[in-house]
Amino acid sequence: MKRRVFIALLVGSVAGGTVRLLAAETGREVSVAASKFEFTPDTVKAKVGAPLTFVLTSLDRIHGFKMPEFGLRTDIIPDKETRLTITPTKPGSFAFFCDVFCGDGHEEMAGTLVVEA
Amino acid sequence: MHHSERRQFLKLAGLAGVTFTAGLFPERRAEAQAGDFHFVQMSDTHWGFKGPPNPDAEHTLEKAIVTVNGLANKPDFIIFTGDLTHTTEDAKIRRERMKRFKEIVSGLNVKDVRFIPGEHDASLDKGEAFKEFFGATHYTFDHKGVHFITLDNVSDPGAKLGDEQLAWLAADLKQRKPDDRIVVFTHRPLFDLVPNWDWATADGAKAIDLLMPYQNIVVFYGHIHQEHHHMTGHIAHHAAKSLIFPQATPGDAPKRPPPPPFDASLKPLGTRDVAMGKAVTITELPVTKA
């Protein structure tokens, strides 16, 4: 499969934690596949202070991936791999969802990042 | 106390529901109020939707039209603020739904009926079908001394107005005086109502920045299927009920829950009459006359 790798050029502090680009700090990788109208898996676990990289792919069409509490969003484009790295700074449950309208069911296309202390 | 903070929810007799005196032209000179009028906002009809959230989906719109046609004072115009039809990936069915919707609303006894799109109408084809049936997705018009601006924050599936439309808005506003009376119609909230539920417009803050220098602006929108009132500075934003099914109370859960079970006793659906005078007076109307 033709795969192009995208790395989010984001650095900053936000409500849920920091978003980083440094390769040395990508930490654990979690693959999340987007398709109409779900993320698989829809629950991702992380630990406070431990970098986590989402490896995002789409199985059908353009979707979005947004985590407002991390100030994070990206398009997920078929045949491309999109990587976003975060470092949570506090425990809790944080929503992520598709923010590119993709049809009847779009509103339910969401998941949860569970950050443990 | 700021006029807009004086919320007066009054039970009215007969047809009228709840009146909310928004009072949102506080800076406007009294002599400039000539030609006061009213209009009706209808929203989120989702024609084509079927399911438990509205067991009477096939008839709700028609019933609301009967109610609006029965208003003692005929509105000067009626505007539908988006999601006229329920989304479908089938372009043919999308057009069939728009055609049928248009046939049904032709039963309104008001000649001036206007439309803006919601994401269910326009996000899957960038507004192509909507334009065929209803015309431009954003436009302006003037009526009795009030300047109306409709904004399209749905044809871009990422819920953006986009730089081109923002430039268009800026150019239009440059022609206004600071105390002109201005009403904005849009589908999604321009402000971040609940970011985690995507109840926002990606670049809505840019539009609000452009609107902020004008003293007498009020925004009416839909999308969230319930009455809601919010201030960004001196600008009031009023969300309307839908004509298909209610949505959860903003921010009630971390993730947006599905529509709550339909409970007719809560009167979750309806339209609204908006009187434009010294104040903006909103009267919520039920689907059917009690």
Image (tube, grey):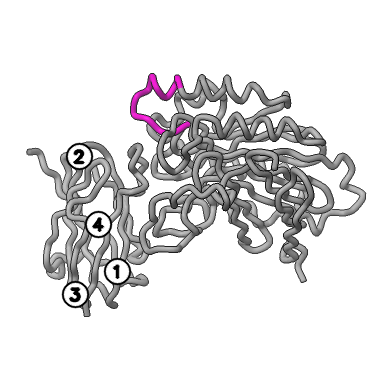
Which is nearer the N-term, disc 4 or disc 1?
4
Residue where numbered disc 3 is placed: A47
Whether residue B75 sits left or right of residue B53 in the image: it is right
Q: CA distance from mark 1 to mark 3?
A: 11 Å
Start-end of magenta stretch: B85-96
Q: Nearer the viewer, residue A83 or B143?
A: B143
Marking on residue A78: 2
Q: Residues within 10 Å of mark 4 (few under 14, many from 20)?
A: some
Circle 3/circle 4 CB separation < 8 Å = no
Q: Decide which of tag 2 and tag 3 comes sooner along the chain.
A: 3
Which residue is depicted at the point 32% across and 71% down? A16
Task: Between label 4 and label 1, give the one nearer the viewer.
Answer: 1
Secondary structure beneath label 2: loop
- Residue B200 in the image, given as x and y percentages of width and height: 47, 53
Which residue is depicted at the point 22% across and 80% down?
A: A117
Q: Chain of mark 1?
A: A
Q: Earlier in the sequence, mark 3 or mark 4?
A: 4
Between B102 and A73, the residue placed more toward the observer is B102
Element at badge 4? loop
Q: Which mark's residue is nearer the viewer, 1 or 3?
A: 1
Q: Which chain does the residue under circle 4 lie in? A: A
- The crowding category of the residue bearing disc 3, from other C-alpha atoms within 10 Å (few below 14, some 14 to 19, many at least 20), is some
Relative to B7, A74 lies left or right: left
- Are there few (<14), some (14-19), or many (20+) residues within 10 Å of tag 2? some
Between the C-alphas of marks 3 and 4, the distance is: 21 Å
